[in-house]
Each structure stands twice: as structure tokens, then as C-alpha cells.
């Protein structure tokens, strides 16, 4: 059983080689925009919980960059909008089911 947990953790914690190289470049030069762009592209494919760490590092390194703040805010807003739409869809589904249920009793 411990090997299953280890395999799942390894799969969940997989870090692409290009991200490792970008992190290494940032250790040498924290202002390397090429390395940051690799990390941001990778973060855009991650859930917001993981991507948030990268965005926070980016805006703390470049606090006056409106472009980087915009990326961070868009990621947060998109996540919020997605969950809002899911909740609205569930609500409308419940309303439709209620109407169908009550109307079928009237017929």
C-alpha cells in the first residue's frame, strides 16, 4: 500500500524539466523574464491553488508591473466565475426539476 501512495504522490508532484531549469535560472537571476514566462505558462495550466504561489512570487518580484498583476487577477477572477457558473447551473437545474415535478402532478 505504501508504494501506491508514493506513486500517486510522485505523479501529483511531477515537475517538468523546463520548470526546473527556469527555477534554477531564477536562483541565479531573479529578474530573468524568460524564466518567469515559463513558470507563468506552467501556472496557467494548474489549479489556482498551485498557480497562486507562482503569481504571488511574480508580483512580489515585479510589484510595479501591471501586466503581471493583470495575469494574477485574471486567474483569480476566472476561477471565481467558473465556480459561480457551476452554482448557477445547479440552481437552475433544481428550479427546472421542481417545475417539472409540480407540473406533472397537475396533469
Image: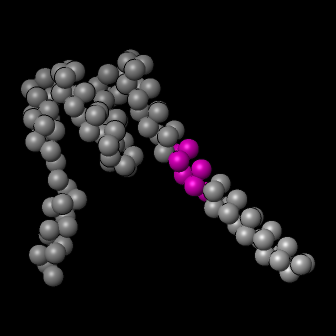
The residue under the point 37% across, 49% down is 47
Location of the C terminus by quadrant is bottom right
From the viewer's perspective, is 11 left or right of 97? left
In this figure, which colouring scheme has been used for the structure?
one colour
Residue placed at 47% from the left, 33% from the top? 74
Does the magenta run of residues contain 16? no
Q: What range of the chain is rendered magenta?
A: 80-87
Q: Nearer the viewer, residue 106 or 49?
A: 106
| Horizontal and vertical percent position of residue 88 | 65, 54
Camera-side residue: 82 or 65?
A: 82
Residue 27 visible here: no
Give the main secondary structure of the magenta stretch. Answer: helix
Q: Nearer the viewer, residue 73 or 30?
A: 73
Using residue 93 as the reference point, say whether residue 12 is left or right of it: left
How many numbered circles are shown?
0
Where is the N terminus found, in terms of image quarters? bottom left
Tell me if 8 is positioned left or right of 66 in this view.
left
Based on the displayed image, in which of its 4 quarters is residue 40 positioned? top left
* Horizontal and vertical percent position of residue 38: 22, 31
Using residue 98 as the reference point, say whether residue 22 is left or right of it. left
Q: Position of residue 2 (x, y in %)?
A: 14, 78
Q: Residue furthest front?
A: 107
Amino acid at each position: 500500500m505504501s508504494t501506491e501512495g508514493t506513486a500517486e504522490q510522485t505523479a501529483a508532484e511531477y515537475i517538468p524539466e523546463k520548470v526546473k531549469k527556469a527555477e534554477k535560472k531564477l536562483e541565479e537571476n531573479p529578474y530573468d523574464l524568460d524564466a518567469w514566462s515559463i513558470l507563468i505558462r506552467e501556472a496557467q495550466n494548474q489549479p489556482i491553488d498551485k498557480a497562486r504561489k507562482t503569481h504571488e512570487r511574480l508580483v512580489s518580484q515585479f510589484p510595479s508591473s501591471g501586466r503581471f498583476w493583470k495575469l494574477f487577477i485574471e486567474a483569480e477572477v476566472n476561477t471565481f466565475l467558473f465556480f459561480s457558473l457551476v452554482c448557477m447551473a445547479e440552481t437552475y437545474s433544481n428550479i427546472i426539476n421542481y417545475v417539472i415535478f409540480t407540473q406533472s402532478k397537475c396533469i
